[in-house]
Image (spheres, rainbow, N blue to C red):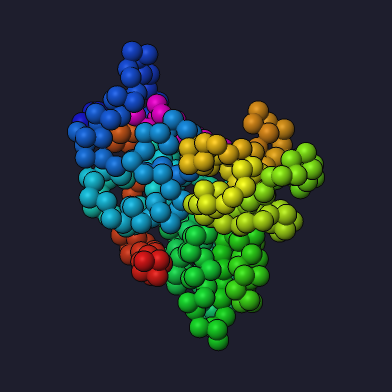
Amino acid sequence: MMIKNIDIKAVEKKGFLDIEIPSSVNLVEEINRLRKEKNAVILAHYYQESEIQEIADYIGDSLGLSQKAAETDADMIVFAGVHFMAETAKILNPNKKVVLPDFNAGCSLAESCPPEEFEKFVKQHPDHVVVTYINCSAGIKALSDIVCTSSNAKKIIDSIPEDKPIIFAPDKNLGRYLIKETGRDMLLWDGSCIVHEAFSIDKLLELHKENPDATIIAHPESESHILKTASYIGSTSGLINFVKNDENNKYIVATEAGILHEMQKEVPEKILIPAPSNEDNTCACSECGFMKMNTLQKLYVCMKYETPEVNINESLRLKSLKPIERMLELSK
């Protein structure tokens, strides 16, 4: 049930409905009640806080979350992730309500590729097939021929005829990795994720020296010098599957530290160590401040009052839908 007289401008400015919740409210119980009452589904990325992961209907990487968003029969999608993810869910579900716990949960990678500048770049290379990593805005997707995630990027690139030149955006690190993996000479946009560029190679090598029996695994958004140290490179879901099936029992994990929660549940007997970042922080690891903007309280409030809601212009939605549908078709 919606609250009357919500100040939408205040919500947009703050990023969430900032109201006091009585300490007597059991957030988990209330979220579970609202989920049934509103026929809502909670989708959460691996990088979310552990308490949000625990209450989610589905936890996944960008590909898995897109697939779940495409097939859900829920009336409301509560997206515990960042803005471009919730936007993708809305693109796939124009008739469903999509809410995001904190509207200001953005993405440094998405912000590194402004649509106006990217459009000029694309027009300068009209013969190129435009492949964009899903970590981008709807405006960028609308300028694309096909979207990919780190899970299916190689498959997507391999599906493009060899005589077709390719633009890959916005992540230059993932692009460089794909050039190496596919042998394709792609034109890269100069964008990156500050979280995956925060790893300290010196600290990582020192940590591995202290733990020589640990296997280093890394996400392909990481910089080349980090990837060179890794025995396995893969998407967030790929990293989890590798640790589940690998025979070793100790790993240094070079991606956002939120993945360790689900990974540890899958392999409770194994030792997982977050790769160290350049910054000295409480976890000595690399965390996404945007992902961590979502909290259990904000999740409850956005479900209860159905705000902030993600909406998208229909013309833009249709343009950005086509490359996403091509990706989902190839990912079956």
The quadrant the N terminus occupies is top left
Between residues 60 and 289, which one lies in front from this camera angle?
Answer: 60
- x and y, in percent, of residue 208 in the image: 75, 44
Q: Is residue 160 above or below residue 44?
A: below
Q: Is residue 209 visible?
A: yes
Q: Is residue 210 magenta?
A: no
- x and y, in percent, of residue 39 in the image: 21, 40
Q: Is residue 290 magenta?
A: yes
Q: Is residue 122 left or right of residue 277?
A: left
Residue in the picture at 48% in, 34% down: 49
Quadrant in which residue 284 is drawn:
top right
Prevailing SS of the magenta stretch: helix
Q: Is residue 218 left or right of residue 68?
A: right
- x and y, in percent, of residue 192 in the image: 62, 55
Q: Is residue 193 left or right of residue 60?
A: right
Quadrant in which residue 327 is drawn:
bottom left
The quadrant the C terminus occupies is bottom left
Residue in the picture at 24% in, 28% down: 33
Q: Is residue 288 visible?
A: no
Q: Which residues are magenta?
A: 289-300
Between residues 126 and 153, which one lies in front from this camera angle?
Answer: 153
- x and y, in percent, of residue 38 in the image: 21, 37
Residue in the picture at 26% in, 40% down: 40
Residue in the picture at 68% in, 54% down: 230
